[in-house]
């Protein structure tokens, strides 16, 4: 089988690896617009549950990536000056560059062809193939060339975010909410290497405007964020990697394929970074597509099966991510809550964690919440 893949992110590279691993005779090429050794952003985080899927469905990939990851159990919510540690979660993280580097090497070792610095306007430019895979990310040009065939929906959300790094290695996944004269600032921060952390700053639209970020230079934005989060950075600087303010695009496609072209990863759908599942879903797409291609003799049947089997579990996570992003859009009003109430609301925000689950993960938080609501738990 000849498979052409546009986009060398986690989705495209994982698919190349799985196809070549299954049958070295497959001809697989990945075409990437960026140079080798470059990417945007810093580290990405996975929940323990997200790693379980990799361990179960692609154990070789799990074994390849796990030694490169940082891991820890706790989550901390910082609400003003109160820290609320929440146990029983479990996370692992990895630098985006390190993840891509490991996947690139593995794909090449298995015989996939990787071509860098080749931006294309559509995966169909890669010519005749049994399958054309658009793994070209949230702003997929291949998808946007024929939105009605894929049934593309795009919803630009209101909050703004900027993806920084820092040299301070944090102990836990931490969500810091600081009420500032300009509005509420949230930082999602966690270690992804022994000496590096992601430090992603999110604000609502009103705060973004009051702060004047729109007209501010990259350096001035960074400086203002350093000032707001000075109590959390302990003298460390924020690091920029093409770090500009963005809005999050929520993307969904009614049809996962059109003819011989199929969408995977962020090109297919995006999930807000607050649930830390975009990379996991991108890799799961590749795992599911490879499995369908291996079990169906005809590519058309494999693509139909891919949508049938992949859509229900993916939709559940997509729905949860959309509830989560709306929680952040309302964070300004929530800051008035007691810090434990706030942390509890955070934990239960997407409806996937109920009181029994909070009690299981962190009995102290459940007890603090029960004390705040004697009418329900008295
Ligand atoms: C701020 C932020 C934080 C995030 N944090 C997390 C996290 O903590 N955990 C997590 O799991 N996920 C996180 N994500 C989501 C995660 O980054 C994505 O879901 C994941 O990278 C999707 O993988 P992908 O391969 O589909 O797309 P991408 O990683 O975007 O890769 C697509 C590739 O295609 C290439 N490309 C695009 N257009 C073309 C073209 N025309 N020609 C050739 N090549 C092209 C790009 O250069 C890129 O290399 C975060 C996302 C954001 C925005």
Image: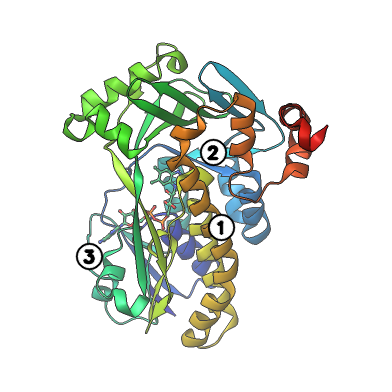
The one nearer the camera, 371 or 352, is 371
Quadrant occupied by the C terminus: top right
Q: Residues within 10 Å of mark 2 (few under 14, many from 20)?
A: many
The answer as to whether callout 3 falls within 8 Å of ligand 1 is yes
Q: Determine which quarter of the picture holds residue 73.
A: top right
Between marks 2 and 3, how big is the CA–CA gap?
31 Å
Q: Which disc, if any, is residue 317?
A: 1
Between marks 1 and 3, how big is the CA–CA gap?
30 Å
Q: Tell me the residue at 75%/43% (across/down).
A: 357
**SS class, disc 1:** helix
Instruction: Provide residue 135's location: percent of width, then percent of height.
Output: 38, 63
Sequence-wise first label, 1 or 3:
3
**SS class, disc 3:** loop
Please say if 182 is above or below 88: above
- Say whether residue 127 is visible: yes
Q: Which disc, if any, is residue 120?
A: 3
* Total numbered badges shown on the rendered structure: 3
The answer as to whether callout 2 falls within 8 Å of ligand 1 is yes
Of all residues, the one furthest to the top in this rendering is: 235
Q: Tell me the residue at 40%/36% (across/down).
A: 42
Which residue matches tag 2? 93
Closer to the observer: label 1 or label 2? 1
């Amino acid at each position: 089988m000849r498979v052409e893949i546009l986009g060398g992110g986690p989705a495209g590279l994982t698919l190349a690896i799985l196809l070549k691993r299954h049958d070295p005779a497959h001809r697989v090429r990945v075409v990437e617009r960026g140079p080798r050794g470059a990417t945007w952003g810093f580290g990405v985080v996975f929940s323990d549950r997200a790693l379980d899927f990799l361990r179960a469905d692609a154990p070789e990939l799990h074994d390849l990536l796990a030694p490169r990851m940082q891991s820890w159990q706790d989550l901390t919510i910082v609400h003003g000056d109160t820290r609320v540690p929440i146990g029983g979660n479990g996370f692992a993280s990895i630098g985006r560059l390190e993840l891509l580097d490991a996947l690139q090497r593995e794909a090449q070792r298995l015989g996939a062809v990787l071509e860098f610095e080749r931006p294309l306007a559509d995966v169909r430019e890669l010519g005749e193939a049994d399958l054309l895979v658009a793994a070209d990310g949230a702003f997929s040009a291949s998808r946007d060339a024929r939105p009605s065939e894929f049934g593309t929906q795009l919803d630009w959300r209101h909050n703004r975010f900027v993806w920084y790094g820092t040299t301070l290695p944090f102990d836990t996944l931490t969500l810091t909410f600081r009420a500032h004269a300009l509005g509420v600032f949230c930082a999602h921060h966690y270690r992804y290497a022994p000496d590096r952390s992601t430090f992603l700053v999110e604000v609502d639209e009103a705060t973004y405007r009051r702060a004047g970020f729109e007209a501010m230079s990259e350096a001035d934005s960074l400086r203002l964020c350093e000032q707001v989060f000075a109590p959390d950075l302990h003298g460390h600087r924020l690091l920029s990697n093409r770090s500009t303010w963005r809005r999050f695009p929520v993307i969904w496609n009614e049809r996962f394929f059109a003819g011989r072209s199929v969408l995977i990863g962020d090109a297919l759908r995006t999930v807000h970074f607050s649930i830390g599942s975009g990379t996991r879903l991108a890799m799961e797409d590749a795992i599911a597509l490879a499995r369908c291609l291996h079990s169906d003799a005809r590519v058309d049947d494999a693509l139909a099966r891919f949508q049938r089997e992949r859509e229900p579990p993916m939709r559940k996570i997509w729905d949860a991510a959309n509830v989560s992003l709306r929680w952040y859009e309302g964070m300004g009003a929530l800051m008035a809550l007691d810090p434990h109430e706030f942390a509890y609301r955070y934990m239960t925000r997407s409806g996937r964690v109920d009181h029994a689950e909070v009690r299981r993960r962190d009995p102290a938080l459940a007890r603090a919440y029960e004390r705040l609501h004697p009418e329900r738990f008295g």
